[in-house]
Image (spheres, rainbow, N blue to C red):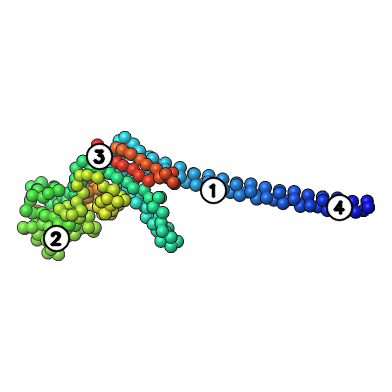
Amino acid sequence: MDNSISKALIMVASVLLAMIVIAFLTFTMRRTGDWATTQDDKILAEQKDKFNKEYEAFDKDLMYGVDVISCLNKAKSNNKQIEEKGYVTGEKHDTSYHVNVKFTLNSALTENITVYHMSNGNRKEIPYEGMGDQPNSSKVSISGSVFSVSGSYASQIPGGSSKIDFSKNLGTYKNGTTKIDSGDYNLVGDKSNLVDALLTCSDTLKQTVKNKNKETSSATDGWTKATWETALYDMKTRKFTCEEIKYNATTGRVNYLHFSEI
């Protein structure tokens, strides 16, 4: 009988030991899972804070247009990455991670092309008369990315052509349907096509084309160089204030900024 009792006690002890081991393993796995989840949440929180700080740096009462341009390009790059990630995985990209930047202009952005030539008297390089956003001189006219020199000046352009074409088509804002007038513009949504077109020249705010033909550049009325100040060149020196910054309710990330010209 004592032997039976001993066996029973051993069985009970074995069962209890197994239950303790199972409980310990379950507890350990749960704690490990909780720790992993906590670590993931911590990483996501750090990523969100870093992301927000990059945009919160633009939340200022006074800044120049160059800061607004920088914010526009940053948001554009972010949105493109979100969309491309969706295309790679085959899933629909999550627009809740998009950032929209709105800016308000008090007056239209202007572009300026100035063509220089050697003066007749002191042989200094000076601009042709009548240059500016709306040239009134019959000597120079602008069409898209091409400026034309008429009259006797036409013969001074290399190749016998009266037109000089810039390397990029940046003049679509002048006298055209995409001119950036006063008003509100959005990176995402209303007038986003105009903002996207405007940002195409953000890497070259000002261009210079030089006349490499020595015969025509050194002539009395021959042109020497032409400079193109784009619409963004005008915008970069204007003063702005950040009117509003918003965060996505789900992600907690910045998803909207509004800048107004002062």
Q: CA distance from mark 3 to mark 1?
A: 41 Å
Residue 34 visible? The answer is yes
For the residues carrying marks 1 and 2, which lies nearer the camera in this image? 1
Q: CA distance from mark 4 to mark 2?
A: 106 Å
Q: CA distance from mark 3 to mark 2?
A: 36 Å
Q: CA distance from mark 1 to mark 4?
A: 48 Å
Return the residue at label 4: 8
Q: Is residue 178 left or right of residue 20?
A: left
Residue contact between numbered discs 1 and 4, judged by CB atoms under 8 Å? no
Residue plotted at (41% across, 54% down): 94
Return the residue at label 1: 40
Please, which residue is most extreme toward the right here?
1
Residue plotted at (19% across, 51% down): 179
At numbered mark 2, what does the secondary structure look like: helix, strand or loop? strand
Mark 2 is on which residue type?
Lys
At numbered mark 1, what does the secondary structure look like: helix, strand or loop? helix
The C terminus is located in which quarter?
top left
Mark 4 is on which residue type?
Ala
Mark 3 is on which residue type?
Glu
Return the residue at label 2: 163
